[in-house]
Image (cartoon, helix red, strand yellow):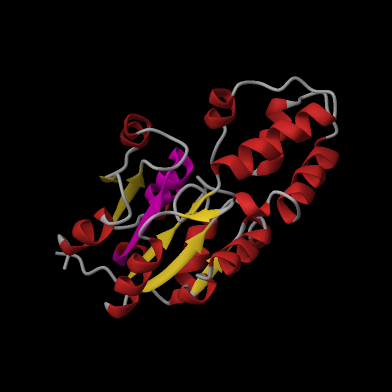
Amino acid sequence: MTQIDAVIFDADGTLLDTREFIFQALERTLGEHGHTVPSRDVFTSYMGAHLVDMYAALAPDGDVAKLVAHHRELHDGELLYLVAAYEGLHELLKHMRDQRMKLGVCTNRGAGARDLLRQIGILGDFDAVVTADDVKKHKPDPEGLLQALDNLGVSAARAVMVGDTPADIGAGINAGVAFTIGVTHGFTTEETLREAGADYIAHHLNDIPTILAKHT
């Protein structure tokens, strides 16, 4: 049985409940710049993509750079109060640290991801954090995940990727990790995660230690 030495997490929708944080920023940015504001189901279909790609698809005739800048201003300011930790997060990270597991984050959010992790009080729990600003290609490309593993000194074959979108699962598969875990409390459904190739499904963060225990 393969020994697991590291777990890499997505941030939004996996560690951090940022649903309202993201949805409200998208709605306000599109609306205030005169673009059609679609339903949240439409937003959900783009979750996991880089912000630039999201706005390019949602407002193909818009000034994407300006839209992204506005979105980030909202996220850096008045909407920050909407970010929360998922239930059981602090307990999960403590348990994994007690197990001497190396922990990392690989996110398609920019450098501001570190500020969100710090705000929730968990930045120090991670040995490596790789954001969209640290790589040229974003998930599902494995560049960021492989960079995080390189920083940890752990091979992909002895690591796990945990995320809530097909982009996260795809990055894990493309990197060649031991297995992937899809979490259902974020932006996509169990069916979508299974279709993306998730090896395991976690409905709560508390499910993750049980899954990992199968490989120890």
Residue shown at the point (17%, 63%) measured from the top left = 213
At 41% from the left edge and 54% from the top edge, which residue is drawn? 175
Horizontal arrangement in the rendering, residue 135 relative to residue 185 (left or right): right
- Up/down of 154 relative to 51, above or below: below
Q: Nearer the viewer, residue 166 or 141?
A: 166
Residue 216 x, y percent position in the rendering = 16, 68
Q: Quadrant of residue 66?
A: top right
Residue 155 visible here: no
x and y, in percent, of residue 56 in the image: 73, 31
Which residue is rendered at x = 60% and y = 21% of the image?
39
Q: Which stretch is magenta?
A: 158-174
Answer above or below: position of 131 versus 137: below
Left or right of 69 in this view: 109: left
Any magenta on residue 164?
Answer: yes
Q: Answer with left or right where residue 61 lies relative to residue 49.
A: right
Is residue 82 a member of the stretch shown in magenta? no
- Choose between 79 and 104: the one closer to the eye: 79
Q: Is residue 68 visible?
A: yes
In this view, the residue in front, 121 or 138, is 121
Figure label count: 0
